Image: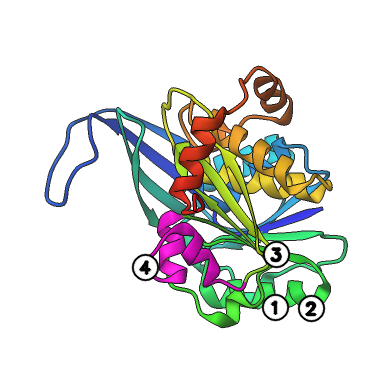
Amino acid sequence: MILVAGSANLDFVVRAGHIPAPGETVLGHSLATHPGGKGANQAVAAARAGAATTHMLLALGADAHAEPLEQSLREAGVQAHIVRCADTATGTAFICVSDDAENAITVAPGANARLAPHHLPPLDGYSHLLMQLETPLPTVIAYARAARAAGVRVVLNAAPAQALDDELLALVDILIVNEGELTSIAGAGGRVRDALDRLRVPLVVVTLGARGCCARQAQQFLLQPGFSIEPVDTTGAGDTFCGVLVAALDRGAPLASALQSACAASALACTRAGAQTAIPDNATVERWLAAQPAPGDARMAALRAACGLDN
Ligand code: RIB
């Protein structure tokens, strides 16, 4: 059983030719709203991946933006523990998605900023606590401390990027980061491998976009090459990866197979618009994976080189 504690945002998404530079105005094509927020996206991904039971602790405002977020969690089968904040807005995110599927995101945290240490439910029965950094850092630390004391594995997706102190890192069992987040935590300089060597977390997984991902556990490196797709919208791809990875580990899958499912699900999520709307279920991922060619030596060699593991 998994508990996700984190953010929920209503995403306002404008598609445009390109993402505006500072001071630039761009005329977009369309506006859509989608349920989002890194925490809620990860909870939906875990539930659709077939995690036995996925619970989510989140905070929502008393406004019309809350209902579509609750509905999306409900429809995915996530059991929500909702902190209602009467005097603040539900979290929102303003996202520009370019024609080449890249995005730029600005979050107005609203109620997410109200999630506090005393809101954590009893942790009996949970195997994993999955968190991100869109809720206050003191709350994340307090939850990690409680989970460690209760014997629940602490999984941190350190997004959005920020420097983290050793107190939090010492409480984390599994850290999931992209390259930028890895640099913020481990410091700039060197290859992915060198940055990983500077971190003492037992299992660190680095997502590398279309190239795939790299995990380091007990001084061993595991690589999973990415899959070839035509991306439409990469929003929520990292969240899909996190939710699917934790769901697979929760049901006892070996790490290599959990990484493969997470990479496949996040690739598929890039082929549809929106965050939660694009997250595939387990059956879809399995079917798609079965039809994929083996990665081939060139892809594996490129990933090895990108991580600094080629010598
Ligand atoms: O990771 C994607 C998510 O980041 C979006 O859904 C947005 O709400 C922000 O939290």
Tell me the element at label 4: loop
Distance from the alpha carbon under mark 3 to that under mark 4: 23 Å
Residue placed most toward the observer, 23 or 217: 217
Q: Which mark is residue 184?
A: none
| Residue 292 vs residue 104, the one in the foreground | 292
The residue at the point 53 percent across, 29 percent down is: 227
- The residue indicated by pointer 3 is 218
In the picture of the structure, the residue carrying the numbered disc 2 is 149
In the picture as drawn, the residue positioned furthest to the right comes out as 125
Q: Secondary structure at mark 2?
A: helix
Q: CA distance from mark 4 to mark 1?
A: 28 Å
Task: Compute the Cα span from label 2 to label 3.
Answer: 22 Å
Q: Is residue 181 magenta?
A: yes
Distance from disc 1 to disc 2, alpha carbons, whole Å, reads 6 Å
Q: Secondary structure beneath disc 3?
A: loop
Q: On the image, which quarter does residue 180 sit in?
A: bottom left
Q: Find residue 276 and report its horizontal and vertical position in percent.
A: 56, 37
Q: Which mark is residue 145?
A: 1
* Mark 1 and mark 3: Cα distance apart in space: 23 Å
CB under 8 Å between callouts 1 and 2? yes
- Furthest toward the top, the residue is 291
**Disc 3 to disc 4: CB gap under 8 Å:** no
Decide: few, some or many residues near mark 3? Use Cα within 10 Å; few <14, some 14-19, many ≥20.
few
The residue under label 4 is 188
**Which of the two marks, 4 or 1, is nearer to us in this view?**
4
Report whether the residue tagged 2 is closer than 8 Å to ligand 1.
Answer: no
Query: Which is nearer the N-term, disc 4 or disc 1?
Result: 1
Q: Is residue 149 above or below residue 92?
A: below
Task: Indicate yes or no: mark 3 CB to ligand 1 under 8 Å.
Answer: no
**Magenta stretch?**
179-200
